[in-house]
């Protein structure tokens, strides 16, 4: 089973689907991570922003 999945991924015939909500959160995370790498926010600010995205709804 695993070998066939690896082959399909290599051949670009197997994809991973994400919900719109997941894509939205992932986009926000990448933006926050970029700000952190650019040193425009601190580690505690990074953690606060990440926790607010995944916190209680």
Image (spheres, rainbow, N blue to C red):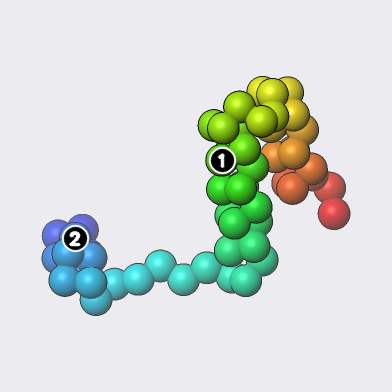
Residue contact at pointers 1 and 2, CB within 8 angstroms: no
Q: Which residue is mark 2?
A: 6
Q: Residues within 10 Å of mark 1 (few under 14, many from 20)?
A: few
Question: Which residue lies at the image location 74% right of the left edge and 39% below the top edge?
Answer: 49
Q: Residue furthest top?
A: 43
* Relative depth, front residue between 54 and 32: 32
Task: Please tell me whether mark 2 sits on a helix, a strand or a loop.
Answer: helix
Q: Position of residue 47 (x, y in %)?
A: 70, 30
Q: Which residue is mark 1?
A: 34
Mark 1, mark 2: which one is toward the viewer?
1
In the rendered image, the vertical position of residue 53 relative to residue 49, given as above or below: below
* Relative depth, front residue between 27 and 34: 34
Question: Which residue lies at the image location 46% right of the left edge and 71% below the top edge?
Answer: 17
* Relative depth, front residue between 46 and 16: 46
Give left or right: position of 46 versus 55.
Answer: left
For the question of whether residue 50 can be seen, the reply is yes
For the question of whether residue 4 can be seen, the reply is no
Q: Position of residue 56 (x, y in %)?
A: 84, 47
In the rendered image, the vertical position of residue 39 relative to residue 26, given as above or below: above
Q: CA distance from mark 1 to mark 2?
A: 31 Å
Task: Please tell me whether mark 1 sits on a helix, a strand or a loop.
Answer: helix
Among the two numbered marks 1 and 2 on one chain, the one whose residue lies closer to the N terminus: 2
* Relative depth, front residue between 19 and 30: 30
């Amino acid at each position: 089973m695993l070998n066939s999945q690896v082959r399909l991924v290599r051949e670009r015939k197997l994809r991973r689907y994400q919900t719109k909500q997941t894509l939205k959160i992932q986009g926000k995370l990448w933006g926050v991570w970029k700000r952190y790498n650019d040193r425009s926010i601190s580690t505690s600010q990074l953690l606060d922003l990440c926790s607010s995205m995944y916190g209680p709804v």
